Image (spheres, rainbow, N blue to C red):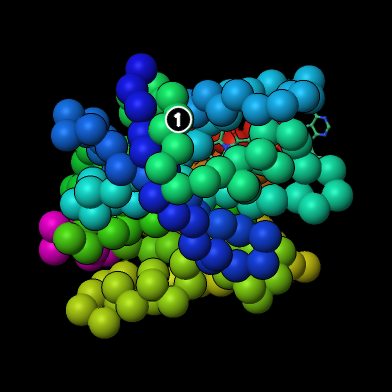
Amino acid sequence: MTLLKFIRKEKNAQNVYSFIFEAPDDFRWIAGQFIQITFPHDNPDSRGIKRFFSISSAPYEKKVMVTTRFDNQNGSSFKKAFYDITPGTFIESTLPKGKFIVDKKDKKIILIAGGIGITPIRSIIFDLDHDNNLKDIDLLYSNRDNDIAFKEEIENKRHNNFLFNIYYFISPILIREETLSKIYEVFPNCYAYVSGPPAMVKSITDILYSKGMTAENIKADYFPGY
Ligand SMILES: Cc1cc2nc3c(=O)[nH]c(=O)nc-3n(C[C@H](O)[C@H](O)[C@H](O)COP(=O)(O)OP(=O)(O)OC[C@H]3O[C@@H](n4cnc5c(N)ncnc54)[C@H](O)[C@@H]3O)c2cc1C
């Protein structure tokens, strides 16, 4: 356990906000990892006072950033209280962990994000760019509408990286087998990272298996609760 000091929040899209924290010097993470935050608040609902969040910032950015979507109608007591967190507040967090990290780069990497599932992928893209390694990477980013979190800053990473491609899938267009087959005429020998709501992650990983990919080349981050 450690304590993170809240600095400020930033709006990334309609109902999507990033929360930026200062961490102790010994707080280290690998791009793609997550933390669990404990945030006691008045009258917590049955969903409780703890939440997992991927760290959406890359380690070189120093500040710890988590990004989440707010549901105006059915939002949890946690999210309502967290939205109003005041600068200077210390929150309890676990140390970062998780295997949704880029540990091999000897093949093409396909990053697939469903909505807020972009969070660990933003961290990975920024980290690879910082290491001059954002090459032979495709981002497939699906979203409910055209108000896409981190769109501009991720697109900016293409300026120096011609081998970084982005494909958007805006609802009702989904990432389907036919579309994947169009992008990849022969399905590439690659690593795939899939992150987002459980139903979306399951349907994409099923497609990837049907295309002949194996479990050792697929990493999945399921965000329950969406
Ligand atoms: C490894 C990991 C990493 C994650 N990273 C992120 C991240 O980076 N960003 C992020 O936003 N989330 C992330 N999540 C998911 C996150 O922990 C929450 O589950 C998610 O944000 C939903 O939050 P919430 O329960 O406060 O619901 P809210 O966001 O307030 O509401 C979401 C919707 O779920 C419905 N809902 C869900 N559960 C219930 C319930 N029990 N009762 C009633 N309605 C319900 C609500 O009606 C509402 O429509 C991650 C999860 C894991 C496991």
Would residue 135 be counted in the magenta stretch? Answer: yes
- Residue at the spot x=53%, y=24% of the render? 38
- Out of 68 and 134, give the one closest to the viewer: 68
Which SS type dominates the magenta stretch? loop
- Out of 173 and 23, give the one closest to the viewer: 23
- Out of 28 and 160, give the one closest to the viewer: 28
- Residue at the spot x=49%, y=62% of the render? 10
* Amino acid at circle 1: Ile
Q: Is residue 110 visible?
A: no
Q: Residue 47 at x, y = what percent?
A: 73, 24
Residue at numbered disc 1: 91
The local secondary structure at tag 1 comes to strand
Residue stretch rendered in magenta on the structure: 131-136
Q: Quadrant of ligand 1?
A: top right
Q: Is residue 104 visible?
A: yes
- Residue at the spot x=71%, y=26% of the render? 42
Q: Residue 60 at x, y = what percent?
A: 19, 52
Q: Residue 198 at x, y = what percent?
A: 66, 37
- Out of 182 and 1, give the one closest to the viewer: 1
